[in-house]
Amino acid sequence: MNPLDLLKSRFAEALEGIAENPAEYLEQIRVSQNPKFGDYQANMAMPLAKKIGKNPRETAALIVEKLRWDDILDPPEIAGPGFINLRFKTETLEKALLDTLADERLGVAKVETPRTYVLDYSAPNVAKPMHVGHIRSTMIGNALDKILRFAGHNVVSDNHIGDWGTQFGMIIYGWRHFLDKDAYEKNPVEELARLYRLVRQKADADPAVMTEVLGETSKLHHGDAENLRLWESFLPNCRTEIDRVYKRLGVGFDHTLGESFYNDRLGPLTEKLRSSGQARESQGALCIFLEGEEVPMLIQKKDGAFLYATTDLATLEYRVETFRPDAVLYVVDFRQSLHFKQLFKAVRQLGIVDEKTELVHVKFGTVLGDDGKPFKTRSGETVGLESLLDEAERRALEVVTANDKDGALSEAERLETARVIGIGALVYADLSQNRDSDYVFSFDKMLAMNGNTATYMQYAFARIRSIFAKGKVDPEKLRRGALETAQGGGTPLKLTEPAERALAIELLKFSDAVHSVLKDYRPNMLTAYLFDLAGRYSAFFEKCPVLKAEDEAVRRSRLLLCDRTAETIRLGLSLLGIGTVEKM
Ligand code: ARG
């Protein structure tokens, strides 16, 4: 069992009879900032004292008196105004860590009450190439997808691609006026992307072109046979294009129900809202007036066209009916905050989604260039995602080649290693940011061997593996041996040095780190943990010789710590959608 959970259950017990609702005080058990004060600290005496009319130190004493600690903790100490300092017995930590040896989940329990999540992420507007911004929704979403499932929840991932918008009007218009047939036959996706860019430019410069583009879009939406046929012929190409990127990133979805999927539902939905009076006309447009909001949500324009919001209403209605979710998460750029605020308000008001169902806009900031402005190429264009992946791999290959001076890696191994490191660097750089913030894109920083990067973590992993290779130790055998020793009453893992103890306790925090991601859907809680772990490992490795340990028992015990570290890094990174390599 992980230390925090253990403490929580003990305190829940102790608080029974002292506090009316013990559960509300358990969040007050926290990691100590300074190891001098123990491993954890329980701070509930202060708020509780007020409630029960005693002073905080008395209250702390009362709690400690009722706490069952002697089998797992050193004697608790009451400090300052009423902090309770808690330090685990070393045996408790040793035992907890041994428990993870036969556990693929490394001690991370599944949640007791699984929820069903609909996870809406990536969702590019197809027909234009994916750009740097898409890495954010795609990889934050993918990490949440993996972590939610790992925690035991049911997840329905749905890629709500934009496959019905103006961009199709643009390429239909482009097709009619500027198509290069040969180019299309050779590489349809590239030609469509060229047409898109060309028409985009023309339409931006000339309102008359824009009007034509909108006309083509509207014809498509109204079932014009020719435009529908063109749209249908473009779509598979667009899908191939994004699927190629997903494959490189290791991302997949349960469903890809794009905007077009909901087209038939928009008319009936708006009619229903109109006739029930829930939507009203204002200056010719159909609107939902939201309680307490000045700006209404527009669902049908004067000319009859539906909007992004209309599709999202229909989508949410469909999702609730089909998947019966407890929560729907939208991993989308913060610039759509107003849209989601209105959407969430509207669906509650309309009774499409009940109060019990959680709706969250998991928002994120912008990827910036060196100049602090949205990341663009030198010529001012948005940066294509694929070229970014190529570049990351190319630069990673330089790092790998420079590292592999003695040529231990074959050509194929080097390329594969560069792939894992390059993509990992890009993904980790994104996930390690507080998602609300913008961040500055920098290949040099993300591929640094030191610092909070995937490269650093992957390198720590590979170094541990090389210890095993060098010592000719098979980790699987080591684990089995340790479990047998423990069963026979022995102690295969001994934490004697402070650095060993510190590493062990960090390892045991993995479970909290995983679950903490899900509190507010923040993958950077896990990257921060992995970074701390790698730091503790370095400190341990500096202080404590492993292969050259003073005797065989210490050597094995330290190898176990190395192995737990490697496995935690591997599992942690994989939950973020990042790979590891044995050698680099
Ligand atoms: N396609 C949209 C865009 O690129 C994002 C869609 C997000 N999901 C949603 N249900 N609105 O801006």
Image (tube, rainbow, N blue to C red):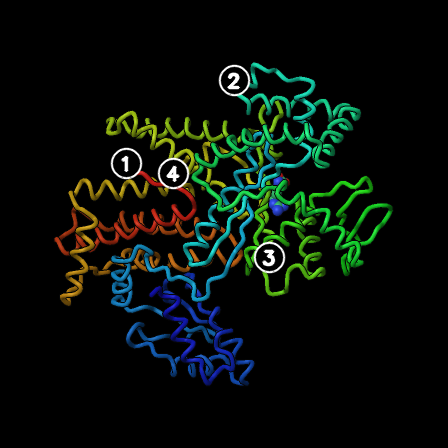
Dot 2 or dot 1: first in sequence order is 2
- The amino acid type, in three-letter code, at marker 3 is Glu
Task: Give how far apart the Cα atoms at labels 4 and 1 are.
Answer: 12 Å
Of the residues tagged 4 and 1, which is closer to the observer? 1
* Quadrant of the rendered image containing residue 164: top right
Which residue carries the number 3 mark? Answer: 321
Name the quadrant where ligand 1 sits.
Answer: top right
Q: How crowded is mark 4: few (under 14 residues within 10 Å), some or many (20 or more)?
A: many
- The amino acid type, in three-letter code, at marker 1 is Lys
Dot 4 or dot 1: first in sequence order is 4
Q: How crowded is mark 1: few (under 14 residues within 10 Å), some or many (20 or more)?
A: some
Task: Give how far apart the Cα atoms at labels 3 and 2 are.
Answer: 43 Å
Pinpoint residue 239: horizontal percent, then vertical percent.
53, 33
Q: Measured along the vertical axis of the image, is residue 505 above or below residue 46? A: above
Which residue carries the number 4 mark? Answer: 455
Task: Give how far apart the Cα atoms at labels 2 and 1 are.
Answer: 40 Å
SS for callout 3: helix
SS for callout 2: helix
Pinpoint residue 149: horizontal percent, then vertical percent.
43, 54
Which residue carries the number 1 mark? Answer: 583
Task: Kindly identify which numbered label has been placed on residue 80.
Answer: none
Task: Give how far apart the Cα atoms at labels 4 and 3 are.
Answer: 44 Å
Q: Residues within 10 Å of mark 2 (few under 14, many from 20)?
A: few
Beta carbon at label 2 within 8 Å of ligand 1: no
Q: Is residue 333 visible?
A: no
Which residue carries the number 2 mark? Answer: 186
Of the residues tagged 1 and 3, which is closer to the observer? 3
